[in-house]
Image: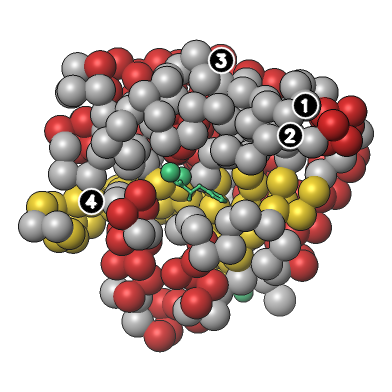
Amino acid sequence: APNIPVANVKAHLRKLQSIANANGGNRAHGRPGYKASAAYIKGKLDAAGFTTRLSPFTYNGVTGWNLIADWPGGDTRHVIMAGSHLDSVRNGPGINDNGSGSAGVLEVALAVSRAKLHPAKHLRFGWWGAEELGMVGSKNYVDNLSQSARSKIDGYLNFDMIGSPNPGYFVYDNDPELESVFTKWFKAKGIPTEIETEGDGRSDHAPFEAAGIPVGGLYSGGETPKSPEQARKWGGEAAKAFDPCYHRSCDTSSNIGAKGLDNNADAIAHAIWTLGTTKVE
Ligand code: PHE
Ligand code: ZN
Ligand code: ZN
Ligand code: ZN
């Protein structure tokens, strides 16, 4: 897999920050900052050759959208999906939560295009609306899949908060095969990981898992303080939250740890290349 340029990921985050600034300080469901965020991501994907659609849903009396992008080619009976929620809370611009996952997945998708990748499996990327209101967008997506469409998704990888300023490296342990794709990569890099324990039922992988689809993902930590032992192995500050600006107005483009974001974006690329180019039996 190619190295993902973290400068590109950070440029997407600056754009999402400027969208929030121009739209009342947030990118929340039902607010103009959400629609502008989706338009930005869609424009990049369209220019890179993806087949994209904005899929509307209604929640709290207002329209939200999921953005779905398919990379043409691959065996559509075997789909590898990666996704992230694109909405913020109303309190702030949501740059770590979840501009980070959204920008990381976008940049990996753009790397697929730059590589003119011909994967064995079909690659699909999703940016979910209204996660912060109860995973509304991702539930809507999964609910609207036919049983046959569900059964064709070999795996869904979720990225929600991957640029925490005082980062940890947490790997979802839901599906052992998907988990090991990530843990092997981090191990080879000499980066210790821990099992992600806060996330179950708390992000967009939950509706996929409930529908019987294997899920995996990465998380760099939220409001919980980093323990002294975690600070010893990962660096950063003990007794301080992984993300002190979680769900706050200070979750801006300064609330990002570049090294963690860089590592996690590279890990996403590794997973997409590994899973997508594995021969279909
Ligand atoms: N879904 C949570 C949020 O957006 C964040 C989270 C991600 C929590 C992963 C746990 C694990 O606020
Ligand atoms: Zn399969
Ligand atoms: Zn959140
Ligand atoms: Zn989140």
Reading the image, the residue beneath label 2 is 226
As measured in the structure, the alpha-carbon distance from the residue carrying label 4 to the one carrying label 1 is 39 Å
Reading the image, the residue beneath label 3 is 7
Q: Earlier in the sequence, mark 1 or mark 2?
A: 2
Residue 237 percent coordinates (x, y): 75, 22
Residue 188 percent coordinates (x, y): 90, 39
Q: Which amino acid does the dot numbered 2 rest on?
A: Lys
Check whether the beta carbons of the residues at disc 2 and disc 3 lie within 8 A of each other. Answer: no
Q: Is residue 189 visible?
A: no
Q: Earlier in the sequence, mark 3 or mark 4?
A: 3
**Closer to us: 199 or 218:** 199
Circle nearer the viewer, 4 or 1: 1
Reading the image, the residue beneath label 1 is 238
Q: Is mark 3 within 8 Å of ligand 4?
A: no
Q: Residue at x 58, y 39 (%)?
A: 222
Q: Which mark is residue 148?
A: none
Q: Residue at x 27, y 36 (%)?
A: 90
Q: Which amino acid does the dot numbered 4 rest on?
A: Trp
As measured in the structure, the alpha-carbon distance from the residue carrying label 1 to the one carrying label 3 is 27 Å
Apparent side of residue 24 relative to residue 134 in the rendered image (left or right): left
**Closer to us: 124 or 47:** 124
How packed mark 4 is, by other alpha carbons closer than 10 Å (few <14, some 14-19, many 20 or more), is: many
Check whether the beta carbons of the residues at disc 4 and disc 1 lie within 8 A of each other. Answer: no
Q: Which amino acid does the dot numbered 1 rest on?
A: Ala
